[in-house]
């Protein structure tokens, strides 16, 4: 395999006398297993939204019910991320990753064979559980199998894979739907999953260690409740602008948000008292890790706002079709593909904090450029601004992830990987919720003026406000990231 890769990628499998991790040959197989699983999960997330109208029609259900085909997976994943990150230290990366892959693959087959929307939603919950078992520890597996000198490079390559999958997903999904039907967006996972399970079981290392105390079940329940309520709050906020939602949606969102806050506080309190906590809070004692986590959270708030806002701008304000909107968004992941591998390679040699800060500054600039789009923007004008966003985010993500994983011990890499996944999910949900509030306020203002809903001009104004907020969140992330430059590097324990 290495002879087909460019020279920098070939270095990923080279052996040096003092290297940590796995030998080059086993490292290659383990990396292929993780990347195949990541591709499956990303494709699934991007394709499903394209397929929902066809699924709704085929299974004779309403659009409101069919949305739960998407939400069930997201909820199951978010609610179990922290639990699986902690469980991995007890049963080992190999057992958990292989089992998660197997569940995801079998559930994909179940989805393809589902004859009712109820069964499909249940299979999607199982898929989400399998996905959480895999994705909660995927970065930690990279940390375990690769030596520190190559960590930035492999994280950059992983960012390229995610971005490329995001860009190709809608096109592949549209092709499968047009030629074979909605069942095949799930069935395509089965052969890939079988291959990935075999590779994972034979290559991913067994990292289990004897448990010192009982599993923190209370922590797992509190974290699940907090993340589940958070997802539901964001989902409700995102529907504020729909006709007939009004104050009822606001009250429901507030109830979910309060539940998430109280459960989160109970979780933190319990972690301080637990003999073997689900999330050891002492990993946050390293300021470089904590600041990297906060940087990730703020950046994903900005990204979450933009990802949800731009389709509204393209379709409601500019009048593009859903397919054209997907094409207009493509330069963003393309920018990540162009930049992320170079950022990862640089992060192995230079300050990850500096590289992250520069990337975030460029990302913020791209969001400002999108917010300044004219009322009737041409595709090329949208495309180059989205490209700037992607390049900035690609230059930020790999170095920042390296900073997080590199500032904990290898024994704690599973916990750090879980924190990384939680910051991403939390940030994106908060971004979606903020956009929902903006749309709700602007829609209420339009109704007060005697209109049934916002017109294209008002839609454009509301989305531009959201994009300015996304730029502000990213500017905050830049400031947090830059604060790391004043601190000396600390070696993990």
Image: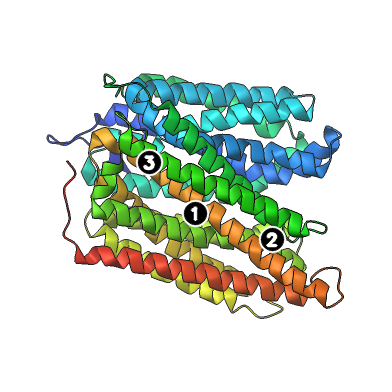
Q: Colour mode?
A: rainbow
> Quick one: 438 or 161, which is closer to the camera?
438
Disc 2 on helix, strand or loop?
A: helix
Q: Is residue 436 left or right of residue 357?
A: right
Count of numbered marks: 3
Q: Tell me how far mark 2 sits from mark 1, CA to CA.
A: 23 Å
Identify the image quadrant of residue 313.
bottom right
Observer-nearest of 354 and 443? 443
User: Which of the two discs, 2 and 1, labels the residue nearer the N terminus?
Assistant: 2
Q: Is residue 30 visible?
A: yes
Q: Which mark is residue 427?
A: 1
- Between circles 2 and 3, the one closer to the viewer is 3
The disc placed on residue 269 is 3
Residue 203 versus residue 277 in the image, above or below: above
Q: Is residue 4 visible?
A: no
**Residue highlighted by disc 2:** 325
At mark 1, the secondary structure is helix
Circle 3 or circle 1, nearest the eye: 3
- Sooner in the amino-acid sequence: mark 2 or mark 3: 3
Q: Residue furthest left?
A: 17
- In the image, what residue occupies the spot 26% across and 43% down? 282
- Label 1 near label 3: C-beta < 8 Å? no
Where residue 228 sits in the image (x, y, percent)? 57, 40
Mark 3 Cα shell of 10 Å, populated few (<14), some (14-19), many (≥20): few
Give residue 8's mark: none
Say few, some or many: other residues with alpha carbon within 10 Å of mark 1 (under 14 / 14 to 19 / 20 or more).
many
Q: Position of residue 329 (x, y in %)?
A: 61, 60
In the rendered image, which quarter contains the N terminus? top left
- The one nearer the camera, 148 or 444, is 444
> From what the image shows, is residue 240 above or below residue 5?
below
């Amino acid at each position: 395999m290495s002879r087909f890769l460019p020279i920098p990628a070939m270095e990923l499998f080279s052996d040096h006398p003092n290297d940590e991790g796995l030998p080059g040959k086993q490292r290659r197989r383990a990396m292929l297993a993780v990347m195949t699983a990541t591709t499956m999960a990303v494709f699934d997330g991007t394709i499903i939204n394209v397929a929902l109208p066809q699924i709704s029609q085929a299974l004779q259900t309403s659009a409101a019910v069919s949305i739960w085909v998407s939400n069930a997976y997201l909820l199951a994943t978010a609610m179990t991320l922290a639990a699986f990150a902690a469980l991995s230290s007890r049963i080992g990366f190999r057992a958990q990753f292989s089992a998660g892959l197997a569940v995801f693959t079998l559930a994909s087959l179940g989805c393809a064979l589902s004859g009712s929307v109820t069964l499909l939603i249940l299979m999607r919950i199982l898929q989400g559980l399998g996905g959480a078992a895999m994705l909660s520890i995927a970065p930690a597996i990279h940390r375990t199998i690769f030596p520190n000198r190559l960590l930035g490079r492999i994280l950059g390559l992983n960012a390229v894979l995610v971005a490329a999958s995001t860009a190709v997903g809608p096109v592949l999904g549209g092709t499968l739907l047009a030629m074979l039907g909605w069942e095949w967006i799930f069935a395509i996972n089965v052969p890939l999953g079988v291959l990935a399970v075999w590779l994972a079981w034979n290559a991913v290392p067994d990292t289990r260690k004897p448990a010192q105390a009982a599993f923190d079940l209370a922590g797992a329940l509190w974290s699940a409740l907090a993340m589940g309520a958070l997802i539901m709050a964001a989902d409700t906020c995102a529907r504020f602008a729909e006709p007939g939602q009004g104050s009822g949606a606001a009250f429901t969102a507030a109830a979910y948000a309060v539940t998430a806050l109280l459960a989160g506080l109970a979780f933190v309190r319990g972690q301080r008292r637990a003999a073997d906590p689900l999330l050891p809070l002492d990993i946050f004692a390293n300021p470089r890790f904590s600041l990297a986590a906060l940087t990730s959270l703020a950046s994903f708030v900005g990204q979450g706002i933009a990802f949800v806002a731009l389709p509204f701008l393209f379709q409601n304000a500019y009048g593009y079709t859903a397919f054209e909107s997907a094409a207009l968004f493509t330069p963003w992941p393309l920018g990540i593909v162009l930049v992320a591998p170079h950022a990862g390679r640089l992060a192995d040699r230079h300050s990850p904090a500096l590289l992250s800060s520069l990337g975030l500054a460029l990302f913020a600039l791209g969001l400002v450029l999108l917010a300044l789009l004219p009322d009737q923007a041409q595709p090329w004008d949208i495309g180059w601004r989205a490209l700037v966003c992607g390049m900035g985010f690609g230059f930020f993500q790999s170095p920042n992830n390296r900073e997080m994983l590199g500032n904990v011990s290898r024994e704690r890499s599973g916990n750090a990987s879980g924190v990384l996944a939680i910051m991403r999910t939390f940030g994106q949900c908060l971004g979606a919720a903020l956009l929902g509030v903006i749309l709700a306020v602007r829609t209420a203002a339009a109704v007060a003026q005697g209109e049934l809903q916002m017109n294209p001009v008002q839609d454009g104004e509301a989305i531009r406000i959201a994009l300015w907020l996304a730029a502000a969140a990213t500017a905050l992330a830049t400031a947090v990231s830059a604060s790391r430059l004043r601190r000396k590097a600390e070696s993990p324990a």
